[in-house]
Image (cartoon, grey):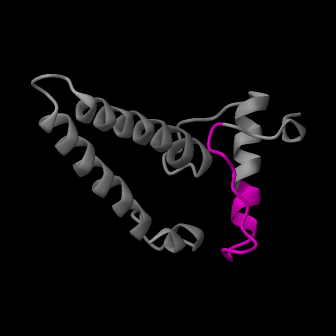
């Protein structure tokens, strides 16, 4: 599914978007199961939800500009975009580079 994210999209949605649906369902289930006593399941579900929200805002909205409303001249945010472009440069699993979503190498920050 992730491979579709590295290919030119023909539509707004990608197969990769199914990850969001799967993890949203899992997080809702865990929060529901742990809702009465606020046990670990609730907080694991909440953590998945918060990560998904950060991923959506940073990765889909800012980095890939799926919505054209979020621009920045901030050096850190531009480094996040640059690191992700390095990630997309190599499409193969062996040559691919992890980009770290929120953490970037200092040499990429200008």
**Magenta region: which residues?**
85-102
In the figure, is residue 90 to the left or right of 42? right
In the figure, is residue 26 to the left or right of 90? left
The relative height of residue 64 versus residue 13 in the rendered view (above or below) is: above
Quarter of the figure with residue 78: top right
Q: Residue at x 71, y 60 (%)?
A: 87
The relative height of residue 47 versus residue 1 in the rendered view (above or below) is: above
Q: Residue at x 69, y 64 (%)?
A: 88
Q: Is residue 26 magenta?
A: no
In the figure, is residue 99 to the left or right of 30? right
Q: Quadrant of the C terminus?
A: top right
Overall secondary structure of the magenta stretch?
A: loop
- Residue 36 at what x, y percent from top left? 9, 24
Q: Nearer the viewer, residue 29 or 69?
A: 29
Q: Residue at x 50, y 51 (%)?
A: 66
In the figure, is residue 89 to the left or right of 55? right
The residue most toward the left is 36
């Amino acid at each position: 599914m992730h491979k579709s994210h590295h290919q030119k999209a023909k539509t707004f949605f990608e197969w990769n978007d199914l990850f969001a649906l799967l993890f949203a369902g899992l997080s809702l289930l865990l929060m529901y199961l742990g809702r009465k006593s606020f046990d670990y399941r609730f907080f694991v579900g909440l953590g998945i939800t918060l990560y998904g929200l950060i991923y959506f805002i940073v990765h889909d909205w800012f980095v890939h500009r799926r919505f054209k409303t979020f621009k920045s001249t901030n050096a850190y945010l531009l480094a996040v975009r640059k690191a992700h472009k390095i990630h997309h440069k190599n499409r193969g699993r062996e040559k691919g580079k992890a980009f770290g979503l929120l953490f970037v190498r200092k040499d990429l920050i200008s």
